[in-house]
Image (cartoon, helix red, strand yellow):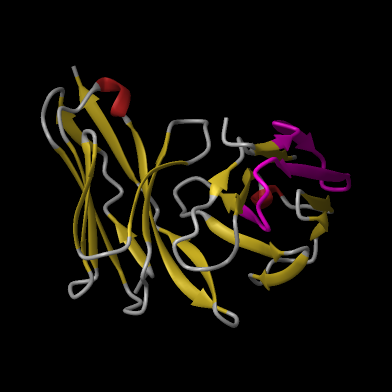
Amino acid sequence: QKEVEQNSGPLSVPEGAIASLNCTYSDRVSQSFFWYRQYSGKSPELIMSIYSNGDKEDGRFTAQLNKASQYVSLLIRDSQPSDSATYLCAVSMPFGQGAQKLVFGQGTRLTINP
Amino acid sequence: ETGVTQTPRHLVMGMTNKKSLKCEQHLGHNAMYWYKQSAKKPLELMFVYNFKEQTENNSVPSRFSPECPNSSHLFLHLHTLQPEDSALYLCASSQGLLDQETQYFGPGTRLLVL
């Protein structure tokens, strides 16, 4: 079982609709969760972080976390063509003594169709 | 701009060459990372440094040799690479290695090994 799993897509969504991106993780002790956006040929940039169960909203983005189900999602409302990118889910996992590292999913490629 | 710079941005090298990748962060962070990103694969953590000390070597072949002379600079020395080492190499930094620490990525070095 992969440590962090995402549907690789591509996911196609019409402009103005809601895009829903999902991620599951294997380590129950994980406490921090991040969504990064990566445009083609560019490096990942942080979109959202979430640490507690429930929803966290930032503009058109909403992150949802359910630790019992080991599931984290990202909703993008009013999708724009500029949202077309690969979205990476990253989950913190312990290593060493008291340290945390990020483990990334393979990413979901999202295309917003005008 | 995330405050993390990488040079060179593109590199083509033969299998017998020796080259170095450089990363510099201007964020006052204490932890720095090297990741490898290949097509169709998740981001792979290679090395982690915290306060100049290496805390993780993720079973990386010895043809990759990291160096961290201070908390702001990180190098990846390359020698006798293989064509399968062609990838995007990303540097990242974070305040530390504790939970909820956000990692900020540099623009990456696109490496092609011939």
Furthest-left residue in this view: A17
Residue A31: quarter of image: bottom left
- Estimate the x, y position of residue B88 in percent, counting from the top left: 61, 42
Left/right placement of residue A94 relative to residue A77 reads right
- Estimate the x, y position of residue A39 in percent, counting from the top left: 43, 31
Q: Closer to the camera, A62 or A103?
A: A62
Give the main secondary structure, helix, strand or loop, of the magenta stretch.
strand
- Estimate the x, y position of residue B41 in percent, counting from the top left: 47, 53
Left/right placement of residue A57 relative to residue B5 reads left
Looking at the rendered structure, the number of numbered marks drawn on it comes to: 0
- Queried whether the magenta region covers residue B111, the answer comes back as no
Furthest-front residue in this view: B28
Q: Closer to the camera, B86 or A56?
A: A56
Range of the magenta residues? Answer: B6-35
Q: Closer to the camera, A18 or B52?
A: B52
Residue depicted at 24% across the width and 70% down the height: A70
Residue B58: quarter of image: bottom right
**Image quarter of the C terminus of chain A:** top left
Residue A2: quarter of image: bottom left
- Estimate the x, y position of residue B39 in percent, counting from the top left: 50, 45
Residue depicted at 88% across the width and 44% down the height: B17
Q: Closer to the camera, A45 or B114?
A: A45
**Image quarter of the N terminus of chain A:** bottom left
Furthest-bottom residue in this view: A97
- Queried whether the magenta region covers residue B23, the answer comes back as yes
Residue depicted at 51% across the width and 54% down the height: B43
Residue depicted at 78% across the width and 63% down the height: B52
